[in-house]
Image: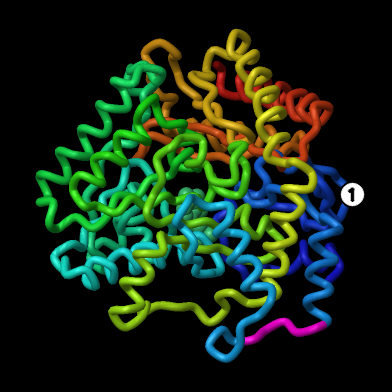
Amino acid sequence: MPSDTLRNTRSHLFYQTGHPRPVLDRAEGIYMWDSEGNRFIDGSSGAMVCNIGHSNPAVLAAMQAQMERFTFGYRLHFVTEASEALAAKTASLAWPGMDRVFFVSGGSEAVESAIKLARQYAIAIGQPSRWKIISRSPSYHGCTLGALAISGYEALSDPFLPMMQAMPKVSAPRAWLDGLDPADPATGAHYAAELERKILEEGPDSVLGFILEPVGGASTGALVPPAGYMEAVREVCTRHGVLLIHDEVMSGGGRTGRFLGGQNWTAAPDILAVSKGFGAGYVPLGAMVAQGHIVDAVMAGGGFLHGFTYAGNPLACAAGLAVIAEIERQDMMGNAQRTGALLKRELEGLMPRFPFIGEVRGMGLLLALELVADRDSKEPLPPELRAFDRLTEQAYQRGLIIYPRRSRGGYSGDHVLIAPPMITTPAQVGEIMERLTDALTAFAAECGL
Ligand code: PLP
């Protein structure tokens, strides 16, 4: 449909953009163009999805080749080379022993699958009293009722509480906000002790799992766990027979410099969920990956009572396989480390000029700016300012896409995520910084900061 027609027609779609948006015409690498020829830098890879950049020719060719053979074969009727190959590749990139892969089409589906596999495992090993999944607040694990129940995001979940089972929460380890030293192992131990207290309070026999994002996504704004945390929560879970689930929907796919964000530490989960960068915006794709003994127990107990029609479809799997091949061929994880370190230094360099940047957080190319009224007291900006939204709009008007979020649960703060594709070059970091600096200057003037 020509863009004029699109602009003048009342849309039948309803999403929460809040702002009028142009019509997307084409995209390549880290850039996107609207139908009037305006160029945008995809500084958040969509919603931290398009990790390898847009229109990668090798991925398009792999999809084309698969499309010319067949695009669908129902998983109960056929196996396909693409799904077998992607499952084997995924297992090889996951943790030792995590070699069983269950495909889905998105992050919420991957998390739902993890919860249900965990529950069936508890039943299979004779522990049916275990059903509670402890999660962190704030956190976001998806919008379906099960994934929402374990999300620490009241604004999204409150209206649906009568329809779902609310699950126990512990604090996300936001050391900076809590005034603790993230480099001190005592800080990791402090948050792990809270988890242990919660397990004891709930009754260890009732606790099925604990879910965390290894490097935080939108809810915590690229939160990197404090020293000792990942190992300490692993120990607590093991001690109480609680399954540890890593939600790698945003941190997986290479963005932190490792294929899985959790692989930046040594403690392995029992089950994990990936999506976003796994299909990298080419196809809806995700996976739940589990330790072999968990899947074996569930299968021996009668099989996994779960599955989605589109799961493991060959077109999605062919694309996913080509995405991983491109990540490896172009050493994109190495680039995420190098370019991420450069971008983080540049962002930190903005702090003297813009005192409302409280903290620059993150790892690799998953970075965030926390916006505050006062850096020392960490007092948030007034909610009515909608700082996260205003800064994002200032950037958007300058052709830079960043990702806005209110942080700190409920309302008590703002952050923006800056997470360009893993192919971003140092020169493109310069382009991002130029536009971001202009946007921050305009934002400061607009808000009187
Ligand atoms: N888990 C995390 C950590 C996420 O960031 C998201 C989405 O932002 C989800 C789960 C849900 O994924 P999806 O929107 O693909 O259902």
Numbered marks: total: 1
Q: Give x and y (percent) for residue 364.
A: 61, 32
Query: Is residue 382 depicted above or below 115 in this figure?
Result: above
Instruction: Estimate how packed mark 1 is, as few (under 14), some (14 to 19) or many (20 or more) residues with alpha carbons within 10 Å.
Output: few
Q: Is residue 185 left or right of residue 132?
A: right
Using the rendered view, name the quadrant where residue 369 is placed: top right
**Range shown magenta:** 69-73
**449 relative to 395 in the view: left or right:** left
In the rendered image, residue 400, in percent from the top left (x then y), is placed at 73, 37
Residue drawn 49% across and 78% down?
308
272 and 40: which is toward the camera: 272
x, y percent for residue 58: 84, 59
Does residue 362 lie above or below 161 as drawn?
A: above
Q: Residue at x 61, y 49 (%)?
A: 253
- Name the kind of residue labelled 1 in the image: Gly
The residue at the point 42 percent across, 27 percent down is 382
Determine if residue 146 is in view: no
Q: What colour-coding does the image apply?
A: rainbow
Query: Is disc 1's CB within 8 Å of ligand 1?
Result: no
- Which quadrant would the N terminus be assigned to in this image? bottom right
Relative side of 252 to 186, left or right: right
In the rendered view, tell whether residue 420 sits above or below residue 325.
Answer: above
Outermost residue to the right: 37
View extreme (top): residue = 352
Q: Seen from this angle, which residue lies furthest bottom?
A: 77
In the rendered image, the vertical position of residue 408 relative to residue 167, given as above or below: above
Q: Main secondary structure of the magenta part?
A: loop
Circle 1 is placed at which residue position? 37
- Give residue 49's position: percent from left, percent from top: 63, 51
- Is residue 212 visible in this depiction of the protein? yes
Between 5 and 74, the one nearer to me in the picture = 74
